[in-house]
Image: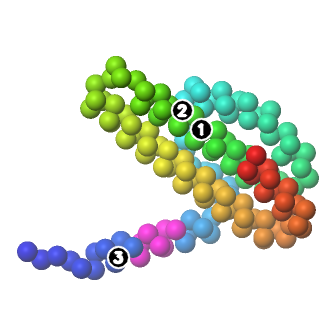
Amino acid sequence: MHIESSRPLNNLARSVQRQASAAERTPEALRQGLRVSLSELGRSLSAKAGEKNRDIDESGLPDSIKQLLKMIRELKAQIAAKEAELKALMADRNLDPEARRLKVEALQSELAMLNGAWASANASLITQMHEQGLGDEQMLTATSLAIA
């Protein structure tokens, strides 16, 4: 039996290259690469987010920063919705254990994807804030809006 020792190293190198190329993408390219379907709860939370984004729109920050902040809020709402779905699924004792396990794995996978998108959007926000040379007050405003 022969085990190819270079395979894990090649996989790691490809992964690093993908991450580097992803980091070079603009926020618009990142948004186009993200596709997430919302549950009914997620859609209702997203609709409410439109009202909640008024503070972002009135912040006086550059448009690209505003769009990233809105995306971060949307992702946070989607994460909250998926977590609520997962919690409800875990509490449902009427399901067959195998069916529950499969559904839990699917939801956990979706959550992992959403959390990755959220982390990427936050990284893009930080990059954009530095590239656009925001002042201390604007940085504080953007940061507080991102965590709100």
**Is there a contact, CB below 8 Å, between mark 3 and mark 1?**
no
| C-alpha distance separating marks 3 and 2 | 39 Å
Query: How crowded is the residue under tag 2: few (<14 C-alpha within 10 Å), some, or many (20+)?
Result: some
| C-alpha distance separating marks 3 and 1 | 36 Å
Give the amino acid type for the residue marked by disc 2 in the picture.
Ala
Of 32 and 45, the residue lying toward us: 45
Question: Would residue 134 appear left or right of 2 to someone viewing this image?
Answer: right
Percent position of residue 115, x then y:
55, 50
Give the amino acid type for the residue marked by disc 1 in the picture.
Ala
Q: Give the residues in magenta.
A: 13-19
Judged from this view, the residue extending furthest toward the top is 94
Image point 68% across, 33% down: which residue?
A: 46
Q: Which residue is mark 1?
A: 80
Secondary structure, mark 3, is helix
Percent position of residue 84, x then y:
54, 32
Q: Which residue is mark 3?
A: 10
**Is there a contact, CB below 8 Å, between mark 1 and mark 2?**
yes
Judged from this view, the residue extending furthest toward the left is 1
Q: Residue 84: give its label.
A: 2
Image point 59% across, 27% down: which residue?
A: 41
Give the amino acid type for the residue marked by disc 3 in the picture.
Asn
**Is there a contact, CB below 8 Å, between mark 3 and mark 2?**
no
| C-alpha distance separating marks 1 and 2 | 6 Å
Question: Would residue 85 appear left or right of 50 to someone viewing this image?
Answer: left
Q: How many marks?
A: 3
The image quarter containing residue 37 is top right
Secondary structure, mark 1, is helix
